[in-house]
Image (cartoon, rainbow, N blue to C red):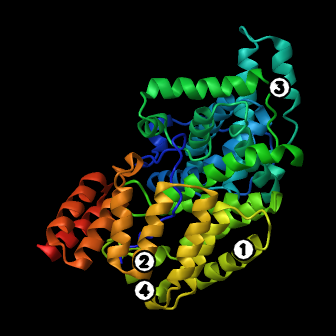
């Protein structure tokens, strides 16, 4: 059965799916570096150097990797230290420029992240002191400098994690519009370029840039605190935070476009943030979201074959599923469902757990999955959830029963351009023997997907029925 191995939650209109061709840091900041002051960090603290005489090609690759994996954490800490998004972004880019030259001569430090935060901190101080000579009031400069006594080189992992959570909650503050929250979060946490986010929201890059500028100005002018809110204030922001984390995971687990089905960096970051959020707020829906991500992530290795082609759920080698992640996910699901506050994420995770517990596709408890979808629809009506339920009904009662539900759903405007609806419809027609209807639906699905592995899968199906 063409049961899509993708999360069941549809993206809200304010959090659309988006193409992610990848951010090239070097195109953004160039490769001209600023000379460092000394072999220690920029205020004399011991940096510790791992190796010397690094070839420029290797150094460029190393810095690109560090930027990809660490830039959001570095930026989060710099925003806390500096209290200003734009100043922190400039400081981080200045730090990477300085690293390009300093590390080529002195080697890569043992703690690159701490070095970059320290370098960015003092680049910002230099920038502020230069501004003091011009229009910026001196008292404003001095107030900012007074808050920079904290030495980021001495930070532990927990304080850095806290900075990430502070940034999430700041970007998701209810004083910002939903569109602004989404755009700001994608820019600051996911590291997407303005152009990439603009394509997702179907607006011009200049309009999207203005949306981000207004969000930053709102945070500054309204004095929105850069902090994890008190428990009494968490509820009003929690849903948006969960949405944002799941948005990151969805794009990492099932990319919208490109040559690869998945983006490991995004899904890994989403899981990391989910774990941090659970430590902060051990609620049922946080457990449910983390369980859902872990259970989907457990199947990553089996989702594509050696050629990078898509492997559907029923055809996956279940011996390649990560059983440690499965066990952790199931334990979280069970804990979430014991709570009276279990919601949509916990129910979706329960569905994923039923799949994970089945040794073979034939062993899948489809009646239980249909029942869970029924509960999910009561809690959160959605045409995408109805589609997933229709597929489960087809597995329980036969393809004709599922097809009847899907043909009714096809009349829903929200699903008219949804790739998986036409793909599922085509598969059910194929199983019944309706070749012409199956071919038409496969071709419709082919027109709608931008992901090359999905296109190869659909072409293969078309060849099989022609």
Alpha carbon distance from label 3 to label 1: 43 Å
Q: Which quadrant of the figure contains the C terminus?
A: bottom left
Secondary structure under the numbered disc 3 in the rendered image = helix
Spatial CA distance of label 3 from label 4 is 56 Å
Q: Residues within 10 Å of mark 3 (few under 14, many from 20)?
A: some
Closest to the camera, between mark 2 and mark 3, is 2
**Label 2 sits on residue:** 313
x, y percent for residue 436: 14, 67
Q: Position of residue 377 (x, y in %)?
A: 57, 61
Q: Quadrant of residue 458?
A: bottom left
The residue singled out by tag 3 in the image is 144
Q: In this image, 184 relative to 153: left or right?
A: left
Label 4 neighbour load within 10 Å: few <14, some 14-19, many 20+: some
If you read the primary sequence from the N terminus, does the residue marked by circle 3 or circle 1 appear first?
A: 3
Residue 186 in the image: above or below residue 365? above
- Image coordinates for residue 155, horizontal then vertical, percent: 82, 52
Which of the labelled discs sits on residue 317, or is there none?
Answer: 4
Q: Which residue lies most toward the left here?
A: 466
Q: Nearer the viewer, residue 186 or 340?
A: 340
Residue 430 rendering spot, x and y as whole percentages: 23, 75
């Amino acid at each position: 059965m063409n049961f899509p191995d993708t999360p069941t939650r549809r993206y809200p209109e304010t959090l659309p799916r988006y193409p992610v061709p990848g951010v090239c840091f070097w195109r953004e900041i160039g490769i001209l570096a600023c000379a460092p002051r000394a072999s220690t960090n920029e205020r004399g603290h011991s940096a510790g150097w791992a190796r010397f005489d690094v070839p420029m090609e290797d150094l460029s690759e190393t810095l690109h990797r560090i930027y990809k994996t660490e830039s959001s954490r570095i930026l989060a800490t710099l925003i806390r230290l500096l209290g200003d998004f734009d100043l922190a972004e400039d400081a981080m880019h200045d730090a990477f420029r300085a690293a390009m030259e300093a590390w080529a001569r002195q080697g890569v430090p043992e703690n690159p992240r701490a070095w970059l935060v320290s370098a960015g901190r003092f680049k910002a101080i230099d920038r502020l002191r230069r501004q003091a000579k011009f229009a910026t009031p001196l008292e404003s400069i001095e107030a900012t400098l007074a808050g920079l006594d904290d030495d980021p080189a001495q930070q532990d992992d927990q304080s850095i994690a806290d900075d990430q959570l502070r940034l999430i909650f700041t970007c998701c503050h209810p004083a910002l519009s939903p569109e602004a929250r989404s755009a700001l979060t994608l820019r600051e946490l996911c590291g997407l370029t303005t152009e990439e986010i603009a394509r997702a929201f179907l607006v011009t890059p200049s309009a999207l840039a203005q949306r981000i500028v207004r969000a930053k100005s709102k945070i500054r002018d309204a004095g929105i605190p850069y902090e994890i809110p008190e428990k009494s204030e968490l509820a009003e922001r929690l849903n948006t935070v969960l949405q944002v984390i799941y948005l990151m995971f969805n794009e990492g687990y099932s990319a919208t476009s490109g040559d690869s089905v998945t983006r490991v960096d995004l899904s890994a970051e989403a899981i990391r943030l989910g774990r941090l959020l659970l430590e902060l707020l051990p609620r049922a829906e946080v457990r449910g979201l983390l369980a859902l991500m872990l259970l989907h992530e457990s199947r990553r290795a089996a989702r594509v074959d050696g050629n990078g082609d898509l492997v559907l759920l029923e055809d996956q080698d279940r011996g390649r599923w990560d059983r440690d992640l499965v066990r952790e996910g199931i334990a979280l699901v069970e804990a979430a469902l014991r709570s009276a506050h279990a919601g949509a994420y916990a129910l979706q995770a329960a569905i994923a757990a039923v799949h994970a517990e089945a040794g073979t596709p034939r062993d899948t408890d489809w009646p239980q999955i249909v029942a869970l979808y029924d509960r999910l629809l009561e809690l959160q009506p959605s045409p995408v959830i109805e589609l997933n339920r229709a597929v489960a009904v087809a597995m329980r009662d036969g393809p004709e029963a599922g097809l009847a539900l899907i043909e009714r759903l096809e009349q829903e405007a929200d699903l008219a351009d949804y790739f998986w609806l036409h793909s599922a419809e085509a598969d059910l027609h194929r199983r019944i023997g309706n070749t012409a209807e199956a071919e038409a639906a496969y071709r419709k699905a082919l027109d709608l997907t931008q992901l090359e592995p999905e296109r190869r899968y659909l072409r293969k199906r078309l060849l099989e029925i022609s």
